[in-house]
Amino acid sequence: MSYIDSFDHEYIGQLGYLPIYHPLETHEHVKWGDYDFGADPTNLVLGGGSGEHPGLVLHRLESFVAKFLLDRITEDDEKLMSEDDRSFVVDLAFVNYSELLEFCDWRISEIASFYEMAKSSAMNLPLYEDEMMEEWLVKSIGE
């Protein structure tokens, strides 16, 4: 049994070897990044915590979608957006990754393994040579 099984959640898919869960209830934080993470229905969680892979809590999911959209939108499409809409999407997309990604007790070996997975040609959109892993993750989830 993994830590995420201690509260109500649903399995919604996979990102490589990591399951993606959606919490269906609020499970309070003790401290940001703790092994036993907190999450709520506004989050997604990669990995299930103890008994599984350490958790990665994804916050502010609208920022993930905005980052993906800005990455995919063409200049012609962008010209069709109102200035208010463009500003709204840009403000959502350009947030510090530390506000979006809560790595819960990840060790260097887990980060290295995740990085290798992200570069794999088995991924729909693999990590580019000059791309930050955090940026790739945000865009991948946003998709």
Image (tube, rainbow, N blue to C red):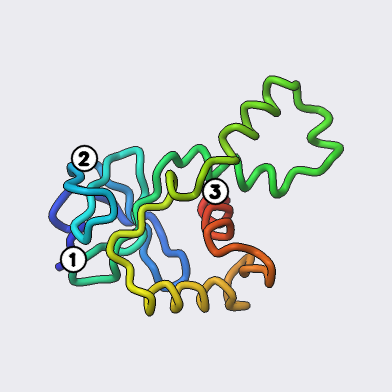
- Farthest residue toward the right? 76
Q: Is residue 24 left or right of residue 94?
A: left
Work out which quarter of the rendered image holds the N terminus and state it.
Answer: bottom left
Alpha carbons under labels 2 and 1: distance apart: 16 Å
Return the residue at label 1. Answer: 2
Q: Position of residue 22 (x, y in %)?
A: 32, 49
Under tag 1, what secondary structure?
loop
Return the residue at label 2. Answer: 25
Question: The disc labelled 3 sits on which kind of residue?
Answer: Gly
Q: Position of residue 3 (x, y in %)?
A: 17, 61
User: In this rendering, is residue 121 above or below 39?
Assistant: below
Q: Is residue 100 left or right of residue 38?
A: right
Task: Name the residue located 70 percent from the left edge and 28 percent from the top edge.
Answer: 86
Return the residue at label 3. Answer: 142
Q: Position of residue 95 (x, y in %)?
A: 53, 41
Q: How many marks?
A: 3
Q: Is residue 37 left or right of residue 106?
A: left
Mark found first going from the N terminus, 3 or 2: 2
Q: Are marks 3 and 1 in contact (CB under 8 Å)?
A: no
Q: Position of residue 55 (x, y in %)?
A: 30, 61
Can you tell which quarter of the image residue 11 is in?
bottom left
Question: Would you call the spot at circle 3 few (<14 residues within 10 Å), some (14-19), or many (20 or more)?
Answer: some
